[in-house]
């Protein structure tokens, strides 16, 4: 069992507070990703869970047991680091057995655990090699294997793919996800890469400035970002933002003026917004479509064609903020050409520009598009 609860967790270094009032529950067997920009506190939070950093205030419970004052060895966790942390003078086999030997495990138990970990990670051919004889991806698998043989209740991963090239990151990402599916043990994974968060997690914890901004499934956070920060951080490329004003309400929908004859509509909570209110309108690049008439006037800056898809970078006429459009397939538009575009129905997000909080009604697909 590996259920984890953080209660009112705070961390300070002298007068500098780096984690603020964190309350979080992670269920047994979940794959949870801590994601956020550099300096948001995600690695510090992971180190506190591991016992490598002290808690200034609050409690850490694993399966109902307060482990806040226990050493790392007493917490039944295993950690995988960005830098692999393998013993260079030892073989792969010795790297895997070393910790168990120090804990006085019986030889038969050690061999059984090594064999199972090597099979799961497909590193049997490398057991007699030294780390310097392995690729980066193979070394990372050995580091994961060293954690597996300990049979912890919780695995902690601190940006384990940062040292790998792009192709290896994709491959190792899939291997870690498959490993979680096979062993069904709680995993907590730290990354600044929102693609890793979106593709690997059962649950994402978004952090900013030492505070938890939002917790939820990848799809929930993508469809229902709670504020401007989460909306801009999750999703690649980032969500487009346009300045707008609520012109009124019609049939339960907000009519939003963004400076053009054609208004947008969005499902906005009428108790949180009023006519005349200034807002920020968010639309993801993939949620624009080209239209023959009406729509919003997009001025093309340049195109990036990737063969199967194309990204258009430009701006809306009369506005300075960059806008990114996604088009399937190969699409070419000359610089400074104009396209009429409109958001797909169910894709418009609306935010308060002062508080940053969403004004959009929570649902699986947010209603929106062009006003009729």
Image (cartoon, rainbow, N blue to C red):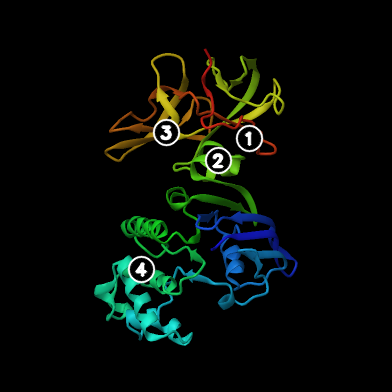
> Does residue 324 appear in this view?
no
Asked if disc 3 and disc 4 are in contact, CB closer than 8 Å, the reply is no
| Lateral position of residue 96 relative to residue 227, left or right | left
Which circle's residue, 3 or 4, is located before the other in the chain?
4
Asked if disc 1 and disc 2 are in contact, CB closer than 8 Å, the reply is yes
Residue 119 coordinates in the image, percent (x, y): 30, 69
| Label 3: how many Cα within 10 Å (few below 14, some 14–19, many 20+) | some
Against 272, residue 308 (above or below) is below
> Label 1 vs label 4: CA separation?
41 Å
Tell which of 337 and 135 is nearer to you. 135
Select label 1 or label 4 by which is in front.
Answer: 4
For residue 141, which numbered disc appears in the image? 4
Which circle's residue, 3 or 2, is located before the other in the chain?
2
Which circle's residue, 1 or 2, is located before the other in the chain?
2
Which circle's residue, 3 or 1, is located before the other in the chain?
3
Quadrant of residue 106 within the rendered picture: bottom left
For residue 231, which numbered disc appears in the image? 2
Quadrant of residue 5 within the rendered picture: bottom right
> Label 1 vs label 2: CA separation?
9 Å
Which circle's residue, 1 or 4, is located before the other in the chain?
4
Query: Residue tagged by mark 3?
Result: 286
For residue 358, which numbered disc appears in the image? 1
């Amino acid at each position: 069992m590996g259920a984890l609860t953080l209660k009112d967790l705070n961390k300070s270094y002298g007068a500098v507070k780096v984690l603020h009032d964190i309350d979080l529950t992670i269920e047994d067997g979940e794959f949870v990703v801590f994601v956020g920009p550099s300096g948001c506190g995600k690695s510090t939070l992971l180190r506190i869970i591991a016992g490598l950093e002290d808690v200034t205030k609050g409690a850490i419970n694993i399966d109902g047991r307060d482990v806040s004052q226990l050493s790392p060895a007493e917490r039944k966790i295993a950690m995988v680091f960005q830098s692999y942390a393998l013993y260079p003078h030892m073989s792969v086999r010795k790297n895997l057995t070393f910790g168990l030997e120090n804990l006085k495990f019986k030889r038969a138990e050690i061999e059984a655990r090594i064999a199972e970990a090597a099979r799961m990670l497909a590193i049997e051919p490398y057991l007699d090699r030294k780390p310097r004889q392995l690729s980066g991806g193979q070394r990372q698998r050995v580091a994961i294997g060293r954690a597996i043989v300990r049979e912890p209740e919780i695995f902690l991963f601190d940006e384990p793919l940062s040292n790998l090239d792009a192709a290896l990151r994709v491959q190792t990402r899939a291997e870690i996800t498959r490993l979680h599916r096979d062993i069904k043990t709680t995993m907590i994974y730290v990354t600044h890469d929102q693609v890793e968060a979106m593709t690997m997690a059962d649950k994402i914890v978004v952090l900013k400035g030492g505070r938890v901004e939002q917790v939820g499934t990848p799809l929930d956070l993508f469809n229902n970002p709670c504020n401007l920060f989460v909306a801009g951080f999750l999703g690649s490329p980032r969500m487009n933002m346009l300045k707008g004003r609520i012109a009124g309400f019609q049939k339960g929908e907000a009519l939003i003026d963004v400076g053009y004859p054609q208004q947008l509509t969005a499902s906005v909570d009428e108790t949180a917004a009023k006519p005349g209110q200034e807002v920020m309108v968010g639309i993801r690049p993939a949620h624009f479509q080209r239209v023959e008439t009406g729509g919003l006037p997009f001025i093309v800056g340049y195109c990036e064609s990737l063969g199967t898809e194309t990204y258009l970078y430009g701006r809306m006429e009369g506005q300075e903020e960059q806008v990114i459009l996604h088009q399937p397939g190969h699409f070419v538009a000359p610089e400074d050409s104009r396209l009429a575009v409109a958001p797909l129905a169910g894709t418009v997000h609306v935010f308060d520009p002062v508080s940053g909080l969403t004004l959009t009604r929570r649902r699986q697909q947010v209603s929106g598009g062009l006003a009729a």
